[in-house]
Amino acid sequence: MRWKGRRQSDNIEDRRGSSGRGFAVGGRGGGGLIRLLPLAIRFLGIKGTLLVVLGVGAYFYFSGGELGDLLGGSQVSHTETRDSSSGGGEIRQSAEEAELMEFVSVVLADTELTWHNLFARAGKTYKEPRLVVYRGMINSACGMGQAAMGPFYCPGDHKVYLDFSFFDELRSRYGVPGDFAQAYVIAHEIGHHVQTLFGISARVMKAKQGRSKAEANKLSVLQELQADCFAGIWGHHADSNRQLLEKGDIEEGLKAASAIGDDRLQKRSQGYITPESFTHGTSAQRVHWFRTGLASGNVSSCNIFGAN
């Protein structure tokens, strides 16, 4: 990709300096563990509950946490957070990580440009998401995330969460090196943000209610495949309007889409596949919809729900 020297996004949060120990226990509704006290008293008695509270309090005292947050249900973890957009402290990083941070910022900026233009054509306003870079574990409005989960998008806070170790895994475990493969991963998560802005995510969530696990999984697959198509749309405009792509880049993206298909992942991990448990789609499906977006560059071509 021809990405060096291009505009970088301001919507990057660098939380690689976070300790990763904090967690939210209260959820969105607040109240935290204090709402569990009546239940604890019922089963443990007043004395037993008091001992548990004292034990938890001692842990938080000696570990540097705040018991008030535990009981009050603070949604934000009290970990050290550095935001690159607000002049936070310097993060220790290798030269390779520094370059990767620049690359991610450039790709995010280019997705912003693409979606601003496409939303404007439709008479809408694109609200930019933020991308959080972290190491190991992170707290989000959707709960605790960790590197093993891979990159993810949280509609609760309109943020994409990315641990750079996933790119290492993409290269070493799945045999998919290359910057456009990495860009595809970012563009896919931005695709989920687009779905949230369009109201698609909310409709899918509502449609899942009352359905069996297998039926709900089918809806998840459609949602993921559409995000692949939206990623392809970004690739189309990055190439045709700004000539970011070089020879071999598209093949990299298609190889990445194929490598993380449910069928291939299940075959690799357990030796057989269970289609009813698919949540992201087969390799062939992911390649098809990514290619569809790449070819058309139009949101209308990604109407996968109408096609099923």
Image (cartoon, rainbow, N blue to C red):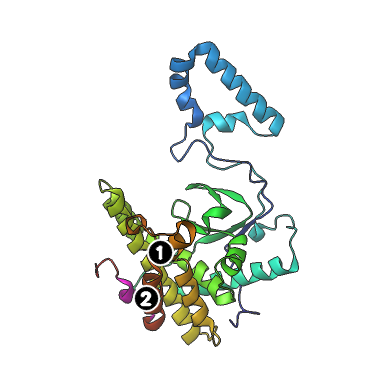
**Could you tell me which residue is drawn at 61 percent across and 41 percent down?**
22
- Evaluate whether residue 301 shows in this view: yes
Whether residue 229 sits left or right of residue 3 in the image: it is left
Q: Is residue 125 above or below residue 114?
A: above
Q: CA distance from mark 2 to mark 1?
A: 15 Å
How many marks the image carries: the answer is: 2
Specify the segment rendered in magenta: 297-303
**Could you tell me which residue is drawn at 59 percent across and 17 percent down?**
51
Is-magenta flag for residue 32?
no
Q: Quadrant of the N terminus?
A: bottom right
Amino acid residing under circle 2: His
The tag on residue 263 is 1
State the residue position of label 2.
288
Image location of residue 269, percent across then percent down: 48, 58
**Could you tell me which residue is drawn at 53 percent across and 58 percent down?**
150
- Evaluate whether residue 241 shows in this view: no
Q: Is residue 97 above or below residue 255?
A: above
Q: Is residue 277 above or below residue 263?
A: above
- Between residue 223 and residue 57, name the one nearer to us: 223
Q: Quadrant of the C terminus?
A: bottom left
The reply to whether callout 2 and callout 1 are in contact (CB within 8 Å) is no
Element at badge 2?
Answer: helix
**Could you tell me which residue is drawn at 47 percent across and 78 percent down?**
235
Element at badge 1?
Answer: helix
